[in-house]
Amino acid sequence: MINTIASGAGPTGDLRLEALNRRIAGRQILAGIDLAVAPGECLALLGPSGCGKTTILRLIAGLERPDGGRILLAGRDITALSPGRRQVAMVFQSYALYPHLSVERNLLLGMELRGVPRQRRQQEADRVLSMLQLESFRSRRPSELSGGQRQRVALARALLRRPQVFLLDEPMSNLDAQLREELRPQLRAILCGGEAPVVYVTHDQKEAMGIADRIAVLQNGRLQQCGTPQELYASPANLVVASFIGRPQINLLDRGDGSLLGIRPEHLQAVEEGGVAVRVLSREWHGASQQLTVASPHGDLRWITSGAEPINDQLRLGWQLQHEHRFDLDTGLRC
Amino acid sequence: MSSSPLRQRPALLRISMVALLMLWSLAPMLWQLYTSLRTPESLLAGLAGLGGGWTLANYSAVLQADPPFGVYLLNSTVVGALSTLLTLALAIPCAYALSRRSDLLKLVIGGGLLAAAVFPYVLLFLALLQVARQLGLANNLLALCLPYAGLSLPLAVLLLQAAFADLPVELEENALLEGFSLGQRLRWILLPLIGPAVVSTGLLVFLFSWNEFPIALTWLSRSELLTLAPAMARIAGSSVFTVPHGAFAAATVLGGVPLLALLLIFQRQIVAGLTQGAIKG
């Protein structure tokens, strides 16, 4: 059932961005972005605010025009097409529900104006309402709904568009942490694995790793790396990706030879001999795990280890060679 | 709420302040109402003869004059309604277009509109009269809508532009992605949301045209075409020997009733329109 709703009216296919450039008031917002998203695949655009990830979404939607490059959908060049003709559905960060209309009218209006026959639009609306457990809210105004309910209505409206691409702009950022965890698998089940590519913008690496098949990390309008969460975690292409993926942040030690050694907090371990001598500065106990900050000759290190392990104030920390990451100090690139 | 420091004023002071303000703004109107219901003799007797001298004769005199007062009311209503519709029909698209720009031209246009809105229009009426003569618009009731709408447009565009600008832009963007045309976006999304602002702007225009005097006085001379303001001036100056206080007051009251009705009907939208944008979200 999920697939029949997510599937588009026309043939769906992959989304390709080729050498996208965007400049606003002389400032380079995006520089040479190349990305491809397969049908049913969920790509997360991850990066700090201002990195250009929302701009990419708006370019795909047609709300902005690129200054260079092409956008291809199922092999067709849609770069110059108006937003209404792209068959793209977007869930905005603010949800953009029409505040003067009931939930049901919010869903029906678009189909009504697109000329879907009355009986069919009611059927479709009923179907997504029940799929997203919104039946009992159908006559409420958006202002009478909680944040999570609003998000589901926005999602329902996007599904009804029968889009060839789903775009989601930080759809979870207005929800509290617990609700986010609950909704993540739900969102994945509804959107991904259908026939339309999904592009998901977030600044939360945990969310990106939890929801996406692949993650594209962006900074300053440039694509840093694109790969599966596992690839990004195991072999980050540069310092930006290394410090953006994985929490707590990766430790970076200056080796004095023009390179930095990266070692993730979870890969440090207490050793009898060898390694480096450290002194515990602070402890946070989280139950299953504990997070410590320790002083070493190379600077302070973040260390995460099992909550059951007793830790002395003075100890030696080591790591396995396979967990070392090396980065060039000047370029930041992996070496 | 009741313990809020903003509400802890002594009751007596509060009530007397409110009473004073009410008296200040309502007394002239109540005085007109009183005058309109008194015979000329009892008006001269002052407050001593309140027991008698009440009459509806002033109203019947005004309503049965030649032409009857109802004609002026109708004229003013027609001119007011048409001016309002014309103004809104032009101001809404202008305001929308202006609200979607963010460049130097918008600043220039906005500044120009503001200058036009605060310009004292009375200074224009002689020039307008020339225009009316040239174009043969004198003594044409409907032609009055042209200067009225023209003079109201700057303020109307500014007010509506602010209302459009206050709407979250994602609402329209989402409608755009849903495939709505410009007309559909205005009809189904934007206009319903700025409804209160449209209503209060429309009422401002209607009020202006209802009260307007110099242009109506100079453009219209045939008595059956007069709007309220010049008509009332005629009643006031209709006799060389006496001032017809009673008849004039009755005309004032009658001329005020439709406005009062409009304000009551649209009360909610007016308040919402005036406070729109004060609190976001």
Image: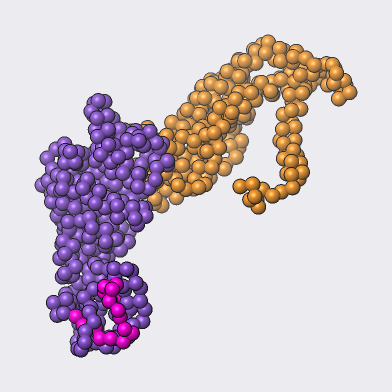
Chain colours: A purple, B orange
Q: Is residue A212 visible?
A: yes
Q: Considering only vertical position in the picture, is A4 above or below A261?
A: above
Bounds of the magenta segment: A302-319
Q: Quadrant of the C terminus of chain A?
A: bottom left
Compared to residue B123, the image places residue B6 above or below, namely below
Residue B181 seen by the camera: no
Q: Can you say which quadrant of the picture contains the N terminus of chain A?
A: top left
Residue A199 relative to residue A137: left or right: left
Give residue A50's position: percent from left, percent from top.
32, 61
Counting from the top left corner in percent of width and height, residue A296 is at: 29, 86
Whole-percent x, y for residue A109 in the image: 31, 33
Residue A234: x %, y % from top left: 16, 69
Residue at x-position 26% and y-position 62%: A205
Q: Is residue A311 magenta?
A: yes
Above or below, A317 relative to B56: below
Q: Nearer the viewer, residue B280 or B214?
A: B280
Which residue is painted at 69% across and 23% down in the image? B253
Say if the magenta span includes residue B97: no
Q: Taking A64 as reference, is A16 left or right?
A: left
Q: Nearer the viewer, residue A179 or A82?
A: A179
Query: Which residue is rendered at x = 35% and y = 57% of the image?
Result: A177
Asked whether, in this view, residue B224 is left or right of residue B143, the answer is right
* Quadrant in which residue A250 is drawn: bottom left
Q: Residue at x 27, y 65 (%)?
A: A220
Seen in the picture, residue A231 relative to B204 is either above or below; the reply is below
